[in-house]
Image (cartoon, coloured by chain):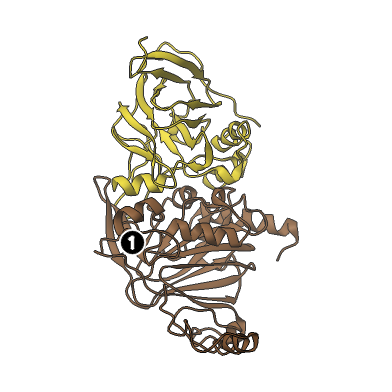
Amino acid sequence: MTDDRGAGRRSSTATLAQARDDARGRADTAVEAMPYLPPASSPYAPADVDPSTLVWAETVAGPGYTHMTVARGTRIRLEDVTGDACAHVVVLSALNPGERLNVADTQKIPWQAYLGAGHPLLSGDGRVLATVVADAAGGRHDAFCGVTTLAGNVERYGAGAAHTATAAGRELLLLAAAKEGLTARDIPPSVSFFKGVRVAADGSLEWTGDGGAGATVDLVAEMPLTLLVANAAHPLDPAEGYRTGPLRVHGWAAAASSPSDPWWTATPERTRAYLNTDQHLLARGIR
Amino acid sequence: MTVTWATHEAAYFDRSTPYVPGAAVLDHEIAPREGWSGVVRAGHVLTLVDVGGNQSGDCLIYDAADHDVRYSAQATLVAQRHAYLVDGSVLRSNEGDPLMTIVGNEVDRQDTIGGACSKESNTLRYGHHTLFHHACRENFLLEGARHGLGPRDLVSNINWFMNVPVEADGTLGIVDGMSAPGKRVALRAERDVLVVISNCPQVNNPCNDFNPTPLRVIVTDPAVEA
């Protein structure tokens, strides 16, 4: 949660005129976590991106959440500003919410449990929802653990409600889903960026830590895509208290993956996943 | 072309017995390639028997009173900090609370990473000629439809009797199973739960030893003598 020093009583609001002036006087307040509009005005626009192509620019509080429906070919960069953020992500087809992230297929189809550059985020329908096209977080990601729960955070931190400083990831995803017209049943297992977990030889889950301050990961939407993002402490984070930090999000108009991208042909399974995706969109007239 | 091979009866089959004694509530054989669903009451124990050996039983669990509360592989693995299900593993919901507990397990470890097969994912894994092979997701959708469930209710499942190692570099996949005819897993319901099982029809990988065979579902009530 961002400490908003602009909030609270400032002046008399006894009359409507005073209340209106007071309300309007608050609008120029800048805080750490807020959207930047128009997106091209983002003070944190990535140096390698033409600001005029930005469609989404925001800093998400920790804990906090965001959500967006984006066009095919949108490239989304998530940044762990301080090294303390954890972005729990669910992606769903904006054409049909029944088609959504399938973590098991995302690990099984590429024969690879760990997310990194070139890894497809697959739906349960044999298609690619999005691709992790760049990873500047050293592979510190996780597809095994998902999000914390309300009851779990009450037990560990004393509180887990969405408005508290120790919000549960699931509570935040429920809100993100609701804003996109979705409900609890639309929240499948999620993937987590910027905090890593590995499976040890004996099967135990080992914490591998973070990718450092300024770590980024880039996703490309391979179809019209709804993203639900909860920025909340990872369930296995060994930190004494609730660990969180701001999450920066920038999205810009780019291109969906094509056969010239190395990940398209990285394995035969992935090639067929992209072919299925392209045909699905071809039939709908989506380019 | 539909692939129909499966073995419904063989001399090596072992239909075993309930893991936990008690009054019989249900005794059903899931034929190869078929689905099954039913409500297991709190305190009752479901024994699943691998009749022919190395037959994957893909399984989803829902709170019978609120289907939005359903099995979460992730919540289950986080709570035990271990990637596999073993004796004593608590099968947790997406809210983190217990749905069922493994009270008996006769194979080294059970899988909840590998997910279910689908016609669509078969095209990725084995080529587009496998699109018309029957698959677990078909069974889940049809059994789920009997209870008002659809694709939005399908999540990462459990694969009883399936073997999914994860290597140090993250390589993961399905290899030959560690089960055998008559091996069992037993699950105690911690509340009234809807259990959906797909007797996996897959014939393109070793999860069924390339030969679908029956699964036996037995539900007993330990509180009542047999």
Give the mark count: 1
Tell me where residue B162 appears, x and y as whole percent.
Answer: 39, 34
Tell me where residue B60 appears, x and y as whole percent.
Answer: 48, 36
Q: Residue furthest front?
A: A14
Say which quadrant the N terminus of chain A sits in: bottom left
Front residue of A148 and A110: A148
Q: Residue at 31% across / 28% down in the picture?
A: B103
Q: Residues within 10 Å of mark 1 (few under 14, many from 20)?
A: many
Colour-to-chain, brown: A
Taking A192 as reference, is B81 left or right? left
Residue type at tag 1? Gly
User: Where A229 falls versus B187 (above or below)?
Assistant: below
Front residue of B102 and A205: B102
Tell me where residue B81 appears, x and y as whole percent.
Answer: 29, 48
Taking A9 as reference, is A260 left or right? right
Q: Which of the 4 quarters of the picture holds residue A71?
A: bottom right
User: Label 1, on which residue?
Assistant: A196
Tell me where residue B164 appears, x and y as whole percent.
Answer: 37, 41
Q: Confirm whether residue B58 shows in the render.
A: yes
User: Where B182 falls versus B134 (above or below)?
Assistant: above
Colour-to-chain, yellow: B
Front residue of A217 and A66: A66
